[in-house]
Image: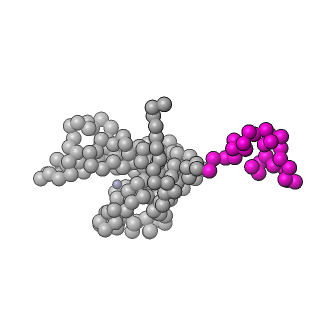
């Protein structure tokens, strides 16, 4: 309303012409930047073929522009149908672990510009391998939703490196619990 009201409080013709004043006000329930970028990372996780864990990541520069998106999957050219997706096997090479690229690394490799001072939004706290790449890429802040592997050596090592390298990390408390997408109009 302030942008259509004169400093003396008089209403503009534009405002008076509004039937009920509603159109003159901005929406109040718009997405916050944090919820928006976390939503993008969660949406991109839906591209993952991993039957157990789908994680997405969204990189954002200091002007709130998205500069990279990724999700967990096998390297380009390595067949989703031929490599294993299982988590347990006698030989580790019969599990997904030696082959899968995590969402954070994919987002960084897919990024469209230098990541100096960028932020990364990822639902799950990064593992130690991704943390090294995050630090080396220039990302300065990690925003996550869940830290369910906090007690693992991997996440402990990740935090140790983030602390040493001055990378901030914070748990997002989303303003809304869900965001609905309707594709059929
Ligand atoms: Zn990782």
Residue occupying image coordinates x 30% and y 41%: 49
Q: Which residue extends farthest right?
A: 8
Q: Which residue extends farthest top?
A: 185
The magenta-colored residue range is 1-28
In the rendered view, would you say 11 is above or below 147? above
Residue 131 is left or right of residue 23, and the answer is left
Residue occupying image coordinates x 69% and y 44%: 22
In the rendered view, would you say 177 is above or below 73? below
Q: Nearer the viewer, residue 76 or 184?
A: 184
Residue 91 position in % (x across, y down): 14, 51
- Asked if the magenta segment contains residue 38, the reply would be no
Residue 136 is left or right of residue 10, and the answer is left
Residue occupying image coordinates x 47% and y 60%: 172
| Ligand 1 rendered quadrant | bottom left
What is the quadrant of residue 76 in the picture?
top left
Q: Which residue extends farthest left?
A: 90
Residue occupying image coordinates x 27% and y 49%: 52
Residue 144 position in % (x across, y down): 43, 58
């Amino acid at each position: 309303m302030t942008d259509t009201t004169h400093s003396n409080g008089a209403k503009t013709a534009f405002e008076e012409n509004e039937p009920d004043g509603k159109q003159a006000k901005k929406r109040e329930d718009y997405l916050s930047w944090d919820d928006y970028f976390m939503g993008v990372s969660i949406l991109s996780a839906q591209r993952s073929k991993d039957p157990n864990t789908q994680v997405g990541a969204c990189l954002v520069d200091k002007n709130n522009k998205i500069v990279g998106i990724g999700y967990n999957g096998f390297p380009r050219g390595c067949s989703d149908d031929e490599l294993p997706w299982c988590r347990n096997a006698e030989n580790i090479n019969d599990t997904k672990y030696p082959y899968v690229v995590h969402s954070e690394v994919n987002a960084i490799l897919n990024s469209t510009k230098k990541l100096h001072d960028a932020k990364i939004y990822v639902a799950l706290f990064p593992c130690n391998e991704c943390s090294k790449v995050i630090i080396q890429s220039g990302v300065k802040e990690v925003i996550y939703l869940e830290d369910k592997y906090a007690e693992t050596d991997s996440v402990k090592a990740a935090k140790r490196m983030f602390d040493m390298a001055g990378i901030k990390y914070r748990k997002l408390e989303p303003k809304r619990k869900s965001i609905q997408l309707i594709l059929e109009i």
